[in-house]
Amino acid sequence: MRRSDKGFVYLWALFAVTVAGVVMAATGQVWQIQMKREKERELLFVGDQFRKAIMSYYNNQITGVRQYPESLEELLEDKRGPVTIRHLRKIYIDPMTMEDEWGLVEEEVSQQAQSPNSATGNANNANPANNSLGSSQISSRKGITGVYSLSNKRPLKKDNFPEHFAKFTEAETYQDWQFVFSRDAGNNNATTQQTSQSGAAGTPASPFGTPSGAASSSGGASAPASPFAPPASGQTGQNPFAR
């Protein structure tokens, strides 16, 4: 083989190696993006499991007290009642950091719980039944309302989130994906459901018909005349016993 032919083969081999390197780099980048999207789906699933577990812990009717857990371990074994309840199967691994350490969203004690002599408290004190009911339903202790990943990387997913995670569209890092259960949101849903049910039921019709006062106020009909009412003026009848 001549020297010129060897140089030509060398150039082709160098070109083939370069093309193979570019293809492998592109394939590796696509694979990394797919893996990151898979981890995001796993993070959404795991975070929602924590949120549902906190909601279940808060709404546990056996204890009679609505309160948030003070640690994630309390979700594994809820010993507040006569029977231990497991709201969460295990402390999941953060798929972004591959560790079981999570950022915690804590609830601040409300002003109403800190100041029992407020206007609401005075109103409840006026009725002992309401006062005992309120104290047995909501606790004033500080607890955990949600979790979030400790990764500071930027997420790929920016849309198509569930309704309760709608704020994730504005997230700058994964730390902004906060999986929180809010009792205010639960109370609003319950209020809306009760309002819709009461609206659907409507006002029951009276078996005795429309009262005479309501009919006269509308002007559509007049009240029936009484058979014992005195005759109208100008229409005085003759006395059959008069002479």
Image (cartoon, helix red, strand yellow):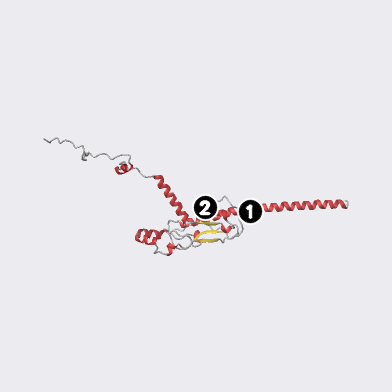
Q: Which residue is mark 1?
A: 35
Rendered residue at 79%/53% (across/down): 14
Q: Is residue 75 above or below residue 196?
A: below
Task: Indicate the position of residue 95 as horizontal and vertical percent values.
Answer: 59, 57
Point out which mark residue 228 bears.
Answer: none
Q: Nearer the viewer, residue 75 or 239?
A: 239
SS for dot 2: helix
Pair 2/1: label in front = 2
In which quadrant of the rendered image does the C terminus lie? top left
Rendered residue at 46%/54% (across/down): 186
Q: Nearer the viewer, residue 158 or 59?
A: 158
Q: CA distance from mark 2 to mark 1?
A: 25 Å
Q: Which residue is mark 2?
A: 164
Circle 2 packing at 10 Å, graded few (<14), some (14-19), many (20+), is few
Q: Is residue 139 above or below residue 221?
A: below
Judged left or right of residue 102, residue 187 is left
Q: Residue 124: name its quadrant.
A: bottom left
Rendered residue at 57%/55% (across/down): 170
Circle 1 packing at 10 Å, graded few (<14), some (14-19), many (20+), is few
Q: Is residue 160 above or below residue 72?
A: above
Q: Nearer the viewer, residue 74 or 145?
A: 145
Task: Indicate the position of residue 80 as horizontal and vertical percent values.
Answer: 44, 60
Q: Nearer the viewer, residue 111 or 44?
A: 111
For badge 2, the amino acid type reads: His
SS for dot 1: helix
Task: Indicate the position of residue 32 as horizontal and vertical percent values.
Answer: 65, 54
For badge 1, the amino acid type reads: Met
Task: Indicate the position of residue 228 as horizontal and vertical percent values.
Answer: 21, 40
Q: Tell which circle, 2 or 1, labels the residue nearer the N-terminal end.
A: 1
